[in-house]
Amino acid sequence: MKASKMKFGISYIDSQSPLHSLNGITKFTLFMAWVTVVLTTFDLRIIVAMVLLGLTLLKMTGVAFQVYKPLLIGTLSVLGMNAIFMFLLAPQQGSDWTNTTTEIIALPGNYSLTQETLFYLLTVTLKYFSMFPIALVFVFTTHPTEFASSLNRIGVPYKIAYAVSLTLRYLPEVKNDFVNIMHAQQARGVDFSKNVPLMTRFRGVANILIPLIFSSLDRADEISNAMTLRGFGRNKSRTWYNDRPLALKDWSMLAMIAICVALALTKRSLDNGIVWYPL
């Protein structure tokens, strides 16, 4: 059995793109504003525009598509299954959403597929997917230490900022542990390929997650002990190696973000209904 290889990463990649030159606070604000706008709208026009803009920003990072291709496939698979489960649990949600019913495929019971439900599932799926590109943009372009120092600069306690830095820094380590455990399971005869049923692959992944959790807890305990031995947290403040103030381009970007969020919230408050349904 041929062992599968996983060639992807979810960590900072210095590709010298224009997005890398922005301050970590600016990119974090963009990410949070993006999530806020997405969660406050069901307008498919806005959602599609955000998907396209997010993919454009992801392309601007200069990170090779092969790096995040498995993540993209995994995300689309999860969103596809989520749409199926949503239909099974509430097959008439779209009709309830728009107060109209246009049947496309007649199915037994209450499971007839309607045009409204299809539109609803498409909107919700794209709504969730729109957060995927901007999350990768933030991770790929933001150095953990530089982001932590920026958080500390705006008043976040350095202990919390350092915890955020450690989280971002050890994402690649968790991925490496996942790959190593998967290879160990494959050496024991566990098959993760497409030749086995889907449920068998799910059980195989479960066998990976349990040791992965325990290894992550062991690493966290080691880091905690090492930081305690070095006196971390004794002083009220600390210095940072990567400490960069907000530049003019950061303030300009923050102003644009604030305007966009204000417009989105204003539109949400003025809309008579949550949904935009043109059909």
Image: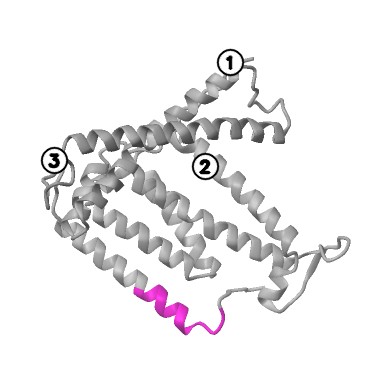
Residue 131, image x and y in percent? 46, 55
Secondary structure of the residue carrying numbered label 2: helix
**Against 222, is 131 above or below?**
below
Residue 19, image x and y in percent? 28, 48
The amino acid type, in three-letter code, at marker 1 is Ala
Instruction: Kindly report which numbered mark, 2 or 1, lies closer to the viewer in this rendering.
Output: 1
Residue 241 disc label = 3
The amino acid type, in three-letter code, at marker 2 is Leu
Q: Viewer-proximal residue, 169 or 133?
A: 169
Q: Residue at x 37, y 50 (%)?
A: 57
Residue 25, image x and y in percent? 25, 55
Residue 72 disc label = 2
Residue 187 disc label = 1
Instruction: Kindly report which numbered mark, 3 or 1, lies closer to the viewer in this rendering.
Output: 1
Q: Quadrant of residue 101?
A: bottom right
**Against 44, is 158 above or below?**
above
Q: Main secondary structure of the magenta part?
A: helix
Along the horizontal axis of the image, is 278 left or right of 225? right
Please give the range of residues in magenta. 262-273
Q: Is residue 21 visible?
A: no
Q: Quadrant of residue 217?
A: top left
- Chain-order first, disc 2 or disc 1: 2
The amino acid type, in three-letter code, at marker 3 is Tyr
Secondary structure of the residue carrying numbered label 3: loop
Q: Is residue 127 visible?
A: yes
